[in-house]
Amino acid sequence: MGLSGAFTAIADDATAASWNPAGLIQLQRAEVSVVLRYAREKDRHHSSDRNVTVSENEFDHANVNYFSAVYPFYAEWLKKNMVISLNVQEAYDFTQSFSSDVIEKSSDQDRVSSSAAFRGIQTDIVQDANATTMRNLVFVSDLETKTITTFQQLLSSDLITSLAFEQQGGIDAITPAWAIKITPALSFGTAINLYQDRPGESIRSRTIATYAGNSDSDVGIISSKTTSGTYAFNGTVTFTIPGFPPVTTNISGEGTYDPFSNVDTS
């Protein structure tokens, strides 16, 4: 609560004013006055950030803007005209409203790869024959398989934060005043301003925040296998020609397998 005061002395022909204590002495009878105030506001807000959306805020509020009660009387014990009054003035109005939406987006991608190699030796025996040829061979394969597995994950999310700010209340000045007519040409008066929260309506504000959002995850696995190696063989081949004795010869050799690959995606 604030406190201030005023002392005024004016001539009898000065213009009367309800906030001028000495001017009140010119009143001849009791008086009451009331001033009402109604306001309707529309606020437009702007933001240069594309992720922040602010909207128009429209609100209205009404209150008593001014009230006064004045009572003039004649003081027998002083033989003077006197006046007392009570004035209530709306000094500050804190009514306000604001709202906005804040959009936050984020994405993250993870990629992890692992590799492994496997080596094996495989032995195959090939025996076949026909009318003129019989083969008896041993194949030895030296194979290596390399596996590369890649794990990919894409995470994306968005969040909308809605903010609403509301404020109400005000400060009124309550002013008791008194004045006395000293001489026909001179009056004296005083007033004290008492600043306080509006009766029954203290200054208060609140901020309301709501959140809404979603997130997505996309996972992919790519696996590739590549096999390569060498081979060697040895054995015998027997040739049979009717009317001649069988002929057997030893054979051997080696070579390289062409690499072959296989890719799986899931």
Image: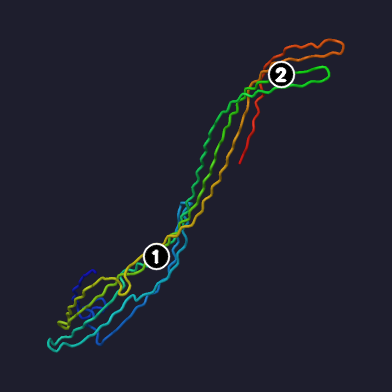
Q: At label 2, which amino acid type do we have?
A: Leu
Q: CA distance from mark 2 to mark 1?
A: 93 Å
Task: Say which element carries label 1.
Answer: strand
What is the basis of the colouring in this image?
rainbow
Percent position (x, y) of residue 71?
24, 85
The quadrant of the picture occupied by the N terminus is bottom left
The numbered mark at residue 137 is: 2
The quadrant of the picture occupied by the C terminus is top right
Residue 38 placement: quadrant: bottom left
**Mark 1, residues whose alpha carbon is within 10 Å: few (<14), some, or many (≥20)?**
some
Residue 12 placement: quadrant: bottom left
Percent position (x, y) of residue 7?
18, 74
Q: Is residue 128 above or below residue 150?
A: above
Q: At label 1, which amino acid type do we have?
A: Glu
**Mark 2, residues whose alpha carbon is within 10 Å: few (<14), some, or many (≥20)?**
some
The residue where tag 1 is placed is 166
Percent position (x, y) of residue 127?
74, 21
Percent position (x, y) of residue 98?
42, 62
The disc, 2 or 1, on the residue closer to the chain's N-terminal end is 2
Which residue is most to the right? 243
In this rendered view, identify the residue nearer to me: 8 or 129: 129
Q: Is residue 209 above or below residue 173?
A: above
Q: Is residue 169 left or right of residue 225?
A: left
Q: Is residue 225 left or right of residue 136?
A: left
In this rendered view, identify the residue nearer to me: 8 or 234: 234
Residue at the location (39% across, 62% down)? 207
In this rendered view, identify the residue nearer to me: 109 or 47: 109
Residue at the location (32% across, 68% down)? 203
